[in-house]
Amino acid sequence: MQIRLVSLLFLYAASVLGATINTLNSTISNERIIGGIQSAPGAFPSAVSLVIRMPGGIGICGGTLITDSLVLTAGHCVYNYATDKPWPASDMHIGYGDNLVDQQEITEGLDVYLHPQFDPSEPKNDIAIIRISPILSGNVQAAQIYTGNLNPGMRLTAIGWGKTSNSPSVRLPNALQQTEIVIGYKDTCSQFLPSYESSNGPQICTENRLNKGSDTCQADSGTGVFATVNGRHYLAGLTSYGANLAGDPACALDDGFAIYTHVAYYRSFIDHVTGLAAKRRHRRLHRHRRHKAKTQSVRHTKDYFINF
């Protein structure tokens, strides 16, 4: 079955970051996500854009800050299919601090952690973490992760700077977009994903028929999907892939499905990586301050998981 991986590749001639950003800006527009609306400024302060420099082109995805220095994204966004390894972290450029792509601050990746059981063929275990220099200012806030049940019929909010139609010439939006998606039912989702039992497992399944005309699309990969509780948004999933039963990868088909990585399911992976990142950060601080009698302790908490 052909599936829609919702990252996006643009070709370009120059190999410098300035050209990369110019190429991206030349593709953006003010159109809406499929079936959605423009997000209000500051509504999703954890959202980041992700541009990966590749030979002859750039890959475009999104991600979510879960600490001041860790970005959660889809594994297939950072994976080099030619080498079976992640792209170098230094080729990953993260935009943050604004809903508008052309107003974002840009930082480079320092390390990248791909899930050790990532399987690119479906993909499965489609999750990765990029470490960046700590963001100490700006309109940003780390997301808290939703750990409650994800039941059939539950509405989630998908966000992203991805395609707003199936047209091959569509320009990417400059402003962050959002749309509602609805969790599907086992009897139908299992036709698309035979291993599917429920959205409380490793993958969340949504059905387009439950909210026709709304969907994520190319370049939304890795961006967050949120559950809303008492008016607050909590990170539930990461955009991964989609199609219909016939294998048509077009977005927003009435009979289409979309699959999202269930973030809370991967708590052990996230906790492991945050521990590694904290140790690296502590060593760096210690090297920089070894002339002092007392080094600053590193903040390392796991309060990004919220129990419901």
Image (spheres, rainbow, N blue to C red):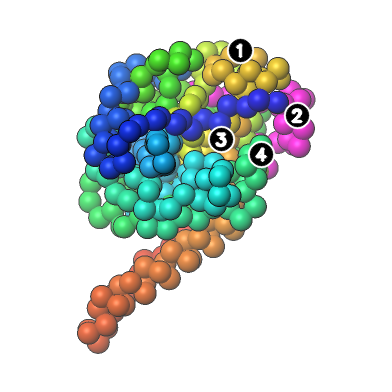
Query: How far apart are the alpha carbons under marks 2 and 4?
Result: 18 Å
Task: Nearest to the eye among marks 3 and 2: give it.
Answer: 3
Above or below 241: residue 107: below
Mark 4 surroundings: few (<14), some (14-19) or many (≥20) residues within 10 A:
few
Mark 3 surroundings: few (<14), some (14-19) or many (≥20) residues within 10 A:
many
Horizontal side of 223 relative to 29 (left or right) equals right
**What residue is shown with label 3?**
240
**What residue is shown with label 1?**
254
Disc nearer the start of the sequence (2/1): 2
- Position in image of residue 221 (x %, y %): 49, 34
Disc nearer the start of the sequence (3/2): 2
Instruction: State whether residue 38 appears in this view.
Output: no
Disc nearer the start of the sequence (3/4): 4
Task: Identify which residue is drawn at 59% across, 58% down.
Answer: 268
Horizontal side of 177 relative to 199 (left or right) equals left
Task: Identify which residue is drawn at 34% across, 45% down.
Answer: 93
Residue 121, disc: 4
Above or below 279: residue 33: above
Front position in the image: 217 or 97: 217
Query: How far apart are the alpha carbons under marks 1 and 4?
Result: 25 Å
- Position in image of residue 85 (x %, y %): 54, 52
Task: Identify which residue is drawn at 62% across, 48% down.
Answer: 118
**What residue is shown with label 2?**
190
Callout 3 secondary element = strand
Query: How far apart are the alpha carbons under marks 2 and 1?
Result: 17 Å
Number of numbered labels in the structure image? 4
Residue segment shown in magenta: 180-201
